[in-house]
Image (cartoon, rainbow, N blue to C red):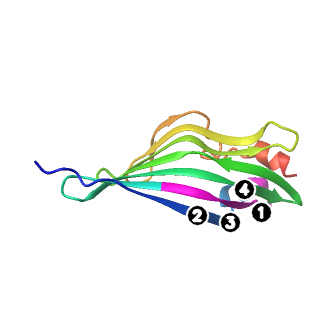
Amino acid sequence: AALATPPETFRIPHEDTFIDEGASAACGFDVVFEVSGIQTIQVLYDAAGNPIRVQIHGNIEGTVTANGITLREIERGQIFLDLVEGTDTEVGLIFRVFLPGGGTAIADVGRLVFDAEGNVTFEAGPHPALHGDFAALCAALS
């Protein structure tokens, strides 16, 4: 019997600076994310050596800045890409932005499943960014 090809694991540095379009549109000013960290990526294969699944763990930290105000941000989520079905499942702490004195300005936490076309097919937990609810973040950056 053929044995499955062993998975491959990669640790990749991740750095990005971007204007969050959804938050910026909701707030009426540019909301800039600057993040860095490590993504651990594991590729799983079938017995024929074809990639069938990718698992990504993010250990990312950074800042969110607007109007001279800077807030701390972290990401600790897991992403599971089913290369056969084309689905994308995101679980855990997708991201959290902290208030300066403690507490949370916004956090996406839980589980999201997207079909091959990018449509949400399952949602558990609060995902305010997914639904355009940036009110608390906008207030914290005002």
Q: Are marks 2 and 4 in contact (CB under 8 Å)?
A: no
Residues under labels 1 and 3: Cα distance? 10 Å
Q: Of the residues tagged 4 and 1, which is closer to the observer? A: 4
Residue type at numbered disc 4: Gly
Pointer 1 or 2: first along the chain: 2
Residues under labels 2 and 3: Cα distance? 17 Å
Residues under labels 1 and 2: Cα distance? 26 Å
What span is in magenta? 25-40
- The residue at the point 58 percent across, 57 percent down is 38
**What's the mark number on residue 30?**
1
Residue 105 percent coordinates (x, y) = 77, 42
Q: Residues within 10 Å of mark 2 (few under 14, many from 20)?
A: few
The residue wearing badge 4 is: 62
Residue type at numbered disc 2: Pro
Q: Are marks 4 and 3 in contact (CB under 8 Å)?
A: no
Residues under labels 4 and 3: Cα distance? 12 Å
Q: Residues within 10 Å of mark 1 (few under 14, many from 20)?
A: some
**What's the mark number on residue 13?**
2
